Image: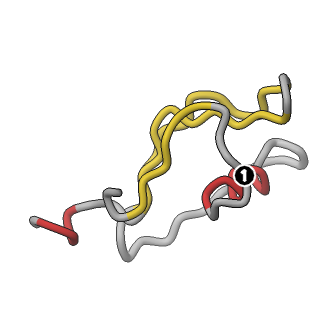
Amino acid sequence: MEGKEARPLVEVRGLTLAYGQRVIQQDLDFEIPRGEVFVIMGGSGCGKSTLMRHLIGLQRPAAGQIFYEGT
């Protein structure tokens, strides 16, 4: 595959999520391929909702990058 179809829909590299000085998740790396189902699972308070808020742009990460369709 080449071009737009070859790139993941979402790509996360070195993402660190924090509230002030409290680190919630550190150095997350993953890709969500186009057309795939992606599940975020974990116990209460582990950062699932925080990750989603970062993915949709409601919060800024402490470190790392989130790319959408390669940008």
Q: Residue at x 57, y 36 (%)?
A: 15
- Please indicate whether residue 64 sits to the left or right of residue 19 in the image: left
Is 10 drawn above or below residue 5 in the view shown?
above
- Residue 39 rendering spot, x and y as whole percentages: 60, 62
Looking at this rendering, what residue extends furthest in the bottom direction?
A: 35
- Please indicate whether residue 16 sits to the left or right of residue 44 in the image: left
- Residue 3 rendering spot, x and y as whole percentages: 14, 67
Q: Amino acid at mark 1?
A: Gln
Looking at this rendering, what residue extends furthest in the left direction?
A: 2
Looking at this rendering, what residue extends furthest in the right direction?
A: 44
Is 3 drawn above or below residue 46 in the view shown?
below
Q: Residue at x 52, y 35 (%)?
A: 64
Instruction: Pick whichever, 51 or 21, lies toward us.
Output: 21
- Residue 69 rendering spot, x and y as whole percentages: 35, 64
- Residue 13 rendering spot, x and y as whole percentages: 45, 38
Residue named by callout 1: 59
User: How is the model colour-coded?
Assistant: secondary structure
Instruction: Pick whichever, 62 or 42, lies toward us.
Output: 62
Snapshot quadrant of residue 35? bottom left
- The quarter of the picture where the N terminus appears is bottom left
